[in-house]
Image (cartoon, grey):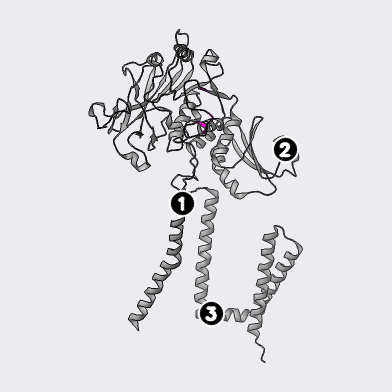
């Protein structure tokens, strides 16, 4: 058998290249250049260069051929494309930009997160205690740290720095802690909402109390039923508020530690003494949220009159038909028009729903004190009826909208003047919008939370909060599952087979 020099050199060159690549791959996997990897790379490089040197004439002859020139052009094109992609990747690394095409913008920071982080006035550290870095988590937190130089992220190996892990109460690997000025919070989840709430908690020097009035059939604060307020209760706690229920009769007055007083859908009237307690609390600079459902009389007329607010004795009906798109009827007014207030300033293009609402409006729009704003306006196709006992509901142009469903009022007391000491009052003609059944719909929950933020004078928290992914799962009955199985296993393949047989028969 005749020895083929060209084939031998080609084999040796291929072997050298394989050793070189194998050594490099071994190095990348192990993370350090060990002796075996060095030997493979050096030997492979030497063998490959030797094969090129001894077969230089064949190499020159190969590249002078027509096919080689075409191959060279292709190789040049490939190298150029790789270089361009590498340059674009470098630009992407140096100038971070991400595009979010999800309908809820799940991977774009919410207004609340941006407002909280960009407004930081003290340094905040995000520390991940783990053996190895997590690039995905680092990229996620980069969205936050890019908003403010006061927010920093770092990885710490708890085995190399056990004192720091002990200082922050770390009990296991991969825990993340948010710390600032001696306050720290361990994250249960590393999502946007939990991180933002943790930043709020560690940067707040005081914890404010939101008091919910009881004793008149109000919505239960801790109940997880559809009518309960447990969802909003949890949301308040996540934003570093503490909540409690208060009975004004047994307390004798509004407790001094109440920063915000909430009345959520009373079914019975207040005693005159209780109404006086609320009025006195407001005159002393207190902040109150009244959510009053239709067909109830809370006996708070004097309180409302002092704040230039009129509570309608009616039920609002929305005849626009838009609610049908969301599975609601005309008794659930939809609001897309909002007043110029910090509470609703970020609601442009959003919707809120109010099942069984009454009108709440400014009594005398010529008065300048207090400063009143009609927050929520229904469509022009809305109107009012006296009550739900009306046998036939028809559009009434005399009471046609837009109708106001809520008013915010602010009373400012210049220094040195006598009389009431400021205070804020928000009245909404519905309480169901913030109950568990409705709070998660569109911006209902944000409306309640923003109202409490404004009353508590936490303006930096007023915003659109992070959204949760929409549940798009499709649930089938057993019969539908069986039909889908037969369709996918028999009908679709059968159509393909019959089509093939038909085409064969026609061409036969």
For the residues bearing labels 2 and 1, Cβ distance under 8 angstroms: no
Q: Earlier in the sequence, mark 3 or mark 2?
A: 3
Give the mark toward the camera: 3 or 1: 1
**How far across and how far down the image is residue 157, in percent?**
71, 45
Q: Earlier in the sequence, mark 3 or mark 1?
A: 3
Residue position for label 2: 164
Which residue lies at the image location 72% right of the left edge and 64% below the top edge? 37
Indicate left or right for 506 with 282 as reference.
left
* Disc 1 secondary structure class: loop
Give the mark toward the camera: 3 or 2: 2
How far is mark 3 from mark 1, CA to CA?
Answer: 66 Å
Q: Which image quarter holds the N terminus?
A: bottom right
Residue nearer the viewer, 256 or 372 = 256
Indicate left or right for 319 with 88 as reference.
left
What secondary structure characterizes most of the magenta part? loop
Judge the density around disc 3: few (<14), some (14-19), many (≥20) Cα neighbours within 10 Å.
Answer: few
Indicate left or right for 162 with 113 as reference.
right
Q: Which image quarter holds the C terminus?
A: bottom left
Residue nearer the viewer, 331 or 133 = 331
**How far across and how far down the image is residue 333, in percent?**
35, 33
* Disc 3 secondary structure class: helix
Residue nearer the viewer, 155 or 497 = 497
Which residue lies at the image location 72% right of the left edge and 38% below the top edge? 164
Give the mark toward the camera: 2 or 1: 1
Disc on res. 475? 1
Count of numbered circles in the view:
3
Residue position for label 3: 64
Q: Magenta segment, which residues? A: 211-230
């Amino acid at each position: 058998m005749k020895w083929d020099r060209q084939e031998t050199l080609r084999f040796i060159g291929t072997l050298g290249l394989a050793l070189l690549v194998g050594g490099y791959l071994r190095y990348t996997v192990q993370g350090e250049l060990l002796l075996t990897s060095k030997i493979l790379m050096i030997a492979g490089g030497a063998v490959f260069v030797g094969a090129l040197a001894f077969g230089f004439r064949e190499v020159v002859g190969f590249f002078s051929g027509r096919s080689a020139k075409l191959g060279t052009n292709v190789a040049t094109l490939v190298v150029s494309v790789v270089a361009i992609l590498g340059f674009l990747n470098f630009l992407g690394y140096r100038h971070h930009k991400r595009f979010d095409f999800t309908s809820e913008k799940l991977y774009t920071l919410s207004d609340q997160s941006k407002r909280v982080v960009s407004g930081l006035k003290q340094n905040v550290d995000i520390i991940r205690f783990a053996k190895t870095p997590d690039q995905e988590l680092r990229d996620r937190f980069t969205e936050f740290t890019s908003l403010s130089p006061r927010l920093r992220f770092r990885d710490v190996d708890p085995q190399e720095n056990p004192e720091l892990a002990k200082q922050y109460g770390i009990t296991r690997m991969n825990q993340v802690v948010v710390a600032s000025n001696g306050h720290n919070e361990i994250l249960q989840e590393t999502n946007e909402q939990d991180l933002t709430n943790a930043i709020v908690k560690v940067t707040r020097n005081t914890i404010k109390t939101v008091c919910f009035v009881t004793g008149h059939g109000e919505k239960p604060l801790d109940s997880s039923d559809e009518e309960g307020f447990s969802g909003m209760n949890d949301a308040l706690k996540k934003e570093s508020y503490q909540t409690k229920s208060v009975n004004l009769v047994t307390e004798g007055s509004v407790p001094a530690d109440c920063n915000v007083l909430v009345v959520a859908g009373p079914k019975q009237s207040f005693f005159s003494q209780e109404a006086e307690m609320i009025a006195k609390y407001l005159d002393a600079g207190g902040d109150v949220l009244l959510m009053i459902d239709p067909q109830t009389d809370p006996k708070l007329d004097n309180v409302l009159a002092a704040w230039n607010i009129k509570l309608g004795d009616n039920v609002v009906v929305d005849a626009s038909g838009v609610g049908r798109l969301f599975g609601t009827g005309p008794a659930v007014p939809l609001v897309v028009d909002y007043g110029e207030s910090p509470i609703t300033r970020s609601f442009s293009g959003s919707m809120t729903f109010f099942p069984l609402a009454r009108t709440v409006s400014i009594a005398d729009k010529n008065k300048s004190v207090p400063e009143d704003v009609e927050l929520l306006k229904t469509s022009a196709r809305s109107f009012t009826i006296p009550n739900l006992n009306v046998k036939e509901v028809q559009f009434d142009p005399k009471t046609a909208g837009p109708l106001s469903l809520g008013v915010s009022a602010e009373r400012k007391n210049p220094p040195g003047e006598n009389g009431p000491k400021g205070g804020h009052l928000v009245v909404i003609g519905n309480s169901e919008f913030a109950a568990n059944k409705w709070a998660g719909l569109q911006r209902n929950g944000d409306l309640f939370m923003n109202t409490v933020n404004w009353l508590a004078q936490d303006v930096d928290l007023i915003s659109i909060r992070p959204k949760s992914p929409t549940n798009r799962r499709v649930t089938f009955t057993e019969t539908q599952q069986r039909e889908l199985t037969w369709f996918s296993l028999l009908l679709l393949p059968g159509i393909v087979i019959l089509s093939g047989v038909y085409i064969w028969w026609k061409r036969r």
